[in-house]
Amino acid sequence: MPAQTPARPAAPAWTIPGFLEVRDGRLHVSGADATELLRQYGSPLYVFSEPRLRSNIERLKRAADGVSRPVKFCYASKANSNMAVLAAVRDAGIDIEVNSGGELFKALRAGFRPEQIIFNGTSKSDDELDDAVRAGIYSINVDSTYEIELVEAAARRAGKRANITLRLVPEIGTRSHIGLQTALLTSKFGITSSEVPDAFRRALAHPELIHVGGIHIHIGSQTPDVEPFAEAFRAMWEHLVALHRETGHTLEHINLGGGIPVNYLRDRSQADQMPEAERDMLGASLEPAEVLAAALAVARESARAADAEHLLDRVTILLEPGRSVVSDAGLVLTTVRNIKRRPETGDVWLLTDAGFNLLLSMTTYKWYYHLVSAARADAPHDTSYKVAGPLCDSGDVYFDIEGGSRLPDYRQLPADVRPGETLALLNSGAYSLAQAFPYNGRPLPAAVMVREGGKVDLVRRRDTYEDLLAGDIW
């Protein structure tokens, strides 16, 4: 019998063909060697992939192609507002959502047109509203009845009519982290159902100053189920119909917000060490096509029942994806700087140079970022370590100090990890760089963008010690 060719070892479960791959035993990001990136640009390092980011946006566009209504995607820039990321989003052909005057400034500077921009937020200042009205953006998403007055005042100052959307909070819970749920009456967001009629009447009182274009709801981030999206759309649709019947005013769009999840548990080797609810949330695989299909299904059902299909024909659906665009398009590379062994417990501790000041969600929400060795990416990750960052806080660890309430107590890496080895925290493109801060006097890292074909551009320079003094006066 002819000799059989040995089977090629299966790729690790965390790999993504064309993006996260193992080549010659090392982690590669869209063709770029991660260990070489760290050598060239220093440690720690944020790494983003433009091809993966574009692929995620194409996934959204394909979902929109499957429904019969116009769909407008507005990237939630709070997830990552690095200018190179914003430029990649713009070039990929979707619009943008901002949450502050600073994000509005960055969006305009990145080349987004005013009609591509929506502005969320609970506490907009007069200056921020003035900037938004003067720019003539697509919509200011109003978070309270009181804010209607503030927008009207800004419109008077600018001598321009402002476009607004009313943000509602219809008491819809999800199976996401409680801190990420934004459609509950206990949250700080939005106008409650009992306030909606008065809010609409107030908003329509001065059409020369403001134009009411739509309604908005955001049920929260990392939502694992389609039902809350459908329930939210039904609630907003019913308000749209009621408003039209009472006033004759026709809304032009319904904004479902963001919340489309990312699967942080492609590698499930440590999933059984998490509570079931945490596994369901972090391992969610809900597709944007499912969200849009469910929303349209309830809208058509309600429209037929209310004899209002003509209103549905005029509605554009808005979505505000952030995490689902950029999270798995980024990672953080870090270096093991120290190692210690506890004879009393048998634990081996790896001390890295990436703390929670670079990955705040790891502390605030006990978020799980899968950890691999970039230098030995294809080696068995079957040895348990305690892994921690460099900050002078006991909470600066890659596990739960409370005893495993959400994160695994240990991380699995190859045997015999030594100081100097490069590790990678995957799926960390969202809410990492955007929330980074120089705690303990640690300058913020550089960031690179890997382009098509493995070309690498520096998109954020590494801070210096002088940058730590930039805002101080003494």
Image (spheres, grey):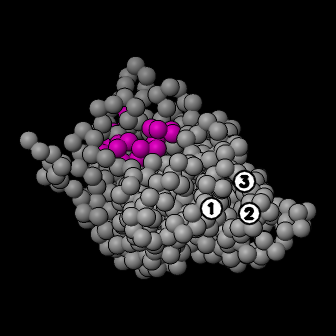
Q: CA distance from mark 2 to mark 3?
A: 23 Å
On the question of residue 394 being in view, the answer is yes
In-front residue for pair 197/91? 197
Q: Nearer the viewer, mark 2 or mark 3?
A: 2
Residue 212 is a magenta residue: no
Q: Position of residue 170 (x, y in %)?
A: 70, 46
Q: Position of residue 115 (x, y in %)?
A: 50, 75
- The residue that appears at 39% across and 68% down in the rendered structure is 158
Q: Amino acid at mark 1?
A: Leu
Residue under circle 3? 232
| Image: 428 above or below 157 | above
Q: Do residues under tags 2 and 1 come within 8 Å of each other at their CB atoms?
A: yes
Q: Which mark is residue 247?
A: 2
Q: Quadrant of the C terminus?
A: top left
Q: Amino acid at mark 2?
A: Thr
Residue under circle 1? 204
Q: CA distance from mark 3 to mark 1?
A: 23 Å
| Image: 166 above or below 212 | above
- The residue that appears at 65% across and 35% down in the rendered structure is 275
Q: Which mark is residue 364?
A: none
Side of 60 relative to 439 (left or right): right
Q: Quadrant of the N terminus?
A: bottom right
